[in-house]
Image: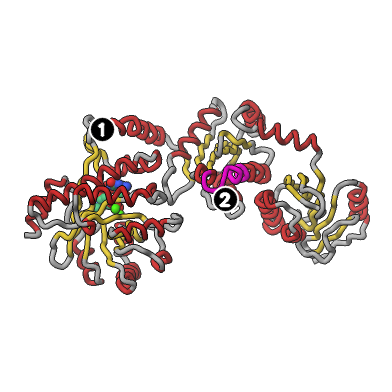
């Protein structure tokens, strides 16, 4: 490769020019040779191969700006390695250039210099202190880019549309999942810093044709022209990867996207509303965080509204009832237990499935009320069996994840045991354990210490991991229906099921399979050493009176 001659005319001119710019720090990073050419009395040593690393490690960049700085560095490195269409990048950073001084705001500019084949060979850097006026302007801009002045944002969108008449337009909206929790757990200052980071980073990622704005508290929107859907997807992935990591805070961004091919007659406000619907459609979904708007979403949200309007009345009118699904011993067919599952018997709409209302309740907190109705029904049922002289079997109830940070739940459960005076062993608790649920171990231990049998629900559905088994407090693993149906089809899959079963036995955990739909599945599980099953092969969830008859009949 031809070496760049830094003593040649053009470079000397450039360096002379940079030297004259007083009050600023300049340096030239010769990327292809991985060295720095200091200009004037720069603090970065000449033998430094990556000045970005140097800035990061020197402590000159303030911690609060580290997130934005990292995004900036990633953009630069991407530019060097995979090429970049832009010619310069800049970021505002809180820095401390000399140890004694107070940290203050600086602009960090990078200008890309290219060779004949457009590859970036050098980057000219400039660190310039922000003037008071600029700092003020930034504050004003922040104010403007909030929902207090959507006109400003709208104006920028209109200008962009005027320049991109023949392109498609994407409205990409995102927010921080459970932002409230960050504020509550880490303090509102940390929350504010995170929002600032998101805002600053958007400034780096979006180009001049991509207006962006903070709409409300933690909701942001980027509007972008595009020709091919892949461009849009890569923008979203870029936002996701660059914005999802700030100062070790754990959070997830949720994206809703609405696109149009036809700018004529497009209603910006409506496009934004549709992006909101798409974003809200994923709330509470642990596996997805990006949704495109489609016409159905409106109906889904309308349905959600109907559910929310009716739920309080439903609770008072006892419209929530418990169904029971039997659990069987595979080898002798006897009923060894039941799972309590909620059903909503709506006076006009008939029976509503939990799949429709549980996610809504989990989001709005109403699940806490519903769960208690089902827990109490289960305890009442057990008392009834005992009173009627029917040999009781344990009933397992679902404990929503919303409860898992509230130790009072244990007392609540114990109060039902006491009220109905039943053996604690007859009420079992199902919890969907998941990798992202911190602190769950403590509450599970607390429940277990109180005497409850603990079942890990939906094991193998993607929420749980083998790693959790090392320290788990659970007594029983409940193999998820999807795990069974997906893995049963292949030789390798069957081996995995079989090993999961023997491994759980090895570490002293009982195991039950749910969603067993065929006799082959039951037989296979039994062959692997799993002797308990629940699923349509045996019975669907049924009303408690039907369950009683079945229990007496099967277990006689
Ligand atoms: P889950 O706890 O995993 O419950 C098992 C679900 O699988 C039940 O759906 C059950 O009807 C269904 N199922 C059982 N066997 C089979 C089978 O062989 N094939 C198929 N295709 N499905 C089978 P359901 O009753 O619709 O409940 C859905 C989910 O709603 C439950 O999943 C649980 O997460 C939640 N849920 C239900 N009742 C309650 C409740 O009282 N409290 C809470 N927190 N969640 C509940
Ligand atoms: Ca369950
Ligand atoms: Ca389950």
Q: Residue at 61%, 42% (x, y): give it.
A: 192
| Rendered location of residue 536, percent (x, y) | 20, 54
Q: Residue at x 21, y 49 (%)?
A: 379
33 horizontally vs 406: left or right: right
**Label 1 secondary element:** helix
Q: State the separation of the CA atoms marked 1 and 2.
A: 42 Å
Image coords of residue 103 (percent x, y): 76, 48
Seen from this angle, which residue lies furthest bottom?
506
Q: Residue at x 24, y 68 (%)?
A: 530
Height in image: 498 above or below 103? below
Q: What's the magenta bit mostly, secondary-structure-wise?
A: helix
Q: Which residue is mark 1?
A: 316
Image: magenta residue range:
184-194
Tell me the quarter of the picture where residue 172 sits.
top right
**In the rendered view, would you say 26 is above or below 195?**
below
Asked if residue 193 lies in the magenta stretch, the reply is yes
Rendering coords of residue 195 (x, y %): 60, 42
Left or right: 406 as drawn, with respect to 327: right
Could you tell me which quadrant the N terminus lies in? bottom right
The disc placed on residue 244 is: 2
Image quadrant for the C terminus? bottom left
Q: Is the residue at mark 1 in contact range of ligand 1, meaning its CB lies under 8 Å from it?
A: no
Residue 327 falls within the magenta-colored stretch? no
Label 2 residue SS: loop
The answer to whether residue 234 is visible is no
Q: Nearer the viewer, residue 294 or 254?
A: 254
């Amino acid at each position: 490769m031809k070496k760049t001659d830094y003593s040649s005319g053009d470079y000397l001119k450039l360096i002379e020019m940079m030297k004259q710019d007083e009050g600023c720090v300049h340096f030239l990073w010769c990327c292809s040779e991985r060295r720095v050419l200091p200009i004037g009395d720069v603090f970065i040593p000449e033998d430094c191969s990556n000045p970005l690393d140097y800035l990061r490690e020197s402590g000159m960049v303030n911690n609060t700006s580290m997130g934005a700085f990292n995004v900036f560095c990633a953009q630069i490195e991407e530019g060097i390695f995979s090429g970049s269409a832009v010619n310069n990048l800049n970021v505002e950073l809180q820095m401390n250039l000399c140890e004694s001084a107070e940290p203050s705001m600086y602009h960090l500019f990078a200008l890309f210099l290219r060779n004949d084949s457009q590859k970036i060979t050098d980057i000219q850097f400039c660190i310039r202190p922000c003037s008071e006026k600029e700092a003020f302007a930034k504050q004003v801009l922040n104010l403007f880019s909030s929902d207090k002045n959507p006109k400003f944002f709208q104006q920028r969108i209109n200008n962009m549309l005027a320049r991109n008449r023949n392109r498609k337009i994407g409205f990409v909206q995102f927010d921080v999942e459970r932002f409230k929790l960050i504020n509550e757990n880490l303090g509102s200052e940390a929350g504010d810093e995170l929002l600032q980071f998101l805002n600053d980073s958007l400034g780096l990622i979006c180009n001049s044709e991509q207006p962006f704005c903070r709409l409300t508290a933690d909701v942001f929107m980027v509007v972008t022209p595009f020709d091919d859907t892949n461009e849009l997807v890569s923008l979203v992935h870029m936002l996701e990867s660059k914005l999802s990591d700030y100062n070790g805070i754990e959070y997830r961004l949720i994206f809703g996207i609405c696109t149009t091919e036809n700018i004529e007659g497009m209603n910006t406000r409506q496009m934004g509303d549709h992006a909101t619907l798409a974003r809200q459609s994923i709330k509470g979904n642990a596996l997805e965080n990006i949704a495109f708007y489609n016409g159905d979403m409106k109906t889904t949200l309308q349905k959600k509204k109907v559910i929310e309007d009716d739920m309080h009345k439903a609770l008072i009118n006892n419209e929530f009832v418990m169904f029971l699904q039997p659990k069987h011993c595979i080898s002798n067919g006897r009923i060894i237990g039941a799972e309590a599952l909620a059903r909503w018997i709506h006076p006009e709409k008939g029976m509503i499935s939990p799949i429709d209302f549980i996610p809504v309740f989990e989001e709005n907190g109403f699940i806490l009320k519903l769960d208690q109705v089902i827990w109490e029904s289960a305890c009442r049922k057990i008392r009834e069996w005992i009173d009627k002289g029917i040999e009781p079997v344990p009933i397992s109830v679902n404990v929503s994840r919303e409860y898992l940070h509230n130790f009072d739940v244990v007392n609540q459960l114990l109060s039902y045991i006491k009220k109905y005076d039943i053996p604690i062993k007859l009420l079992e608790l199902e919890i969907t354990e998941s990798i992202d649920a911190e602190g769950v171990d403590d509450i599970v231990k607390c429940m277990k210490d109180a005497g409850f049998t603990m079942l890990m629900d939906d094991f193998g559905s993607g929420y749980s991991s083998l790693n959790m088994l090392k320290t788990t407090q659970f007594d029983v693993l409940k193999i998820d229906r999807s795990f069974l149906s997906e893995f049963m089809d292949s030789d390798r899959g069957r081996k995995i099921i079989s090993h999961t079963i023997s491994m759980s036995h090895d570490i002293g955990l009982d195991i039950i399979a749910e969603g067993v739909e065929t006799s082959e599945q039951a037989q296979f599980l039994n062959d692997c050493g799993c002797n308990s099953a629940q699923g349509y092969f045996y019975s669907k969830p049924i009303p408690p009176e039907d369950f009683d008859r079945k229990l007496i009949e099967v277990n006689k």
